[in-house]
Image (tube, rainbow, N blue to C red):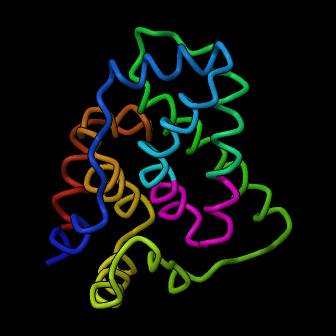
Amino acid sequence: MLTFSVLMISQPVPQKDRLNELLNRISLGDMAAFESLYRETSVGVYSFALSILKNKEDAEDITHDVYLSIYKSANLYKRNDNPLSWIMTITKNFCYKKKNKDKRSCEITEVSQVDYSDLISSDNKILLNECLNNLTDEERQIVVLHIVAGFSHKEISAILSLPYSTVRSKYARAL
């Protein structure tokens, strides 16, 4: 049942060549390309940030910061890399920086505050939150990256710096 609910919020995974082209155009200052990149990847970025931070407002802030960073550093992107992995790595780094900053200032967020309401219908919200709240942080990130953002287990392994077999077993356990 979790798979069905999460699939309702997914967006098509953009093609690598298309994203490479957009990033190249962004590095040249093309705002239309930047807007296209945002439209094609923002649900995955926001969902991944939300799975890490468990706070809607923080995830929105991080998503904003990620796209500002992409705009500023698009010229540093190496065309041979996977553009979606590059974007998610930026997202992960911003999220962990935020979490470490919050930890130092003693702000603790409850797992029950995760709110995917703007990504799914209200009928599925309760079920999805209940299912996701039963997962560990790592399992939740793996599920969101695979189902919502469309990453393969191998790509998730690279993004989260986990062994491939660990990603697959945690994904299976989470489902």
Q: Is residue 102 above or below residue 160?
A: below
Which residue appears at 60% of the width and 72% of the height? 56
In the foreground, 105 or 121: 121
Which residue is depicted at the point 59% across and 64% down? 53
Residue 67 image position (x, y, % from top left):
64, 40
> Closest to the observer: 43 or 147?
43
Quarter of the picture holding the N terminus: bottom left
Position of the C terminus, as image quadrant, is bottom left
- Chain part drawn in magenta: 46-62
Is residue 55 rendered magenta in the image? yes
Q: Is residue 152 above or below residue 83?
A: below
Q: Nearer the viewer, residue 71 or 160?
A: 71
Q: Is residue 71 left or right of residue 117?
A: right
Quadrant of the rendered image containing residue 28: top right
Q: Give the residue displayed 51% in from the left and 10% down from the top.
A: 78
108 drawn magenta:
no
Work out whether 109 lies above or below 91.
below
Task: Give the image quarter of residue 148.
Answer: bottom left
Residue 154, by quadrant, is top left
* Side (left or right) of 27 relative to 163: right
Q: Is residue 61 left or right of residue 101?
A: left
Magenta span main SS: helix
Residue 94 image position (x, y, % from top left): 66, 45
Place of residue 128 in the rendered image (x, y in percent of width and height, measured from the top left): 31, 80
Q: Nearer the viewer, residue 102 or 115?
A: 115
Percent coordinates x, y for residue 92 in the rendering? 56, 44
Give the residue drawn at x 63%, y 16%.
Answer: 27
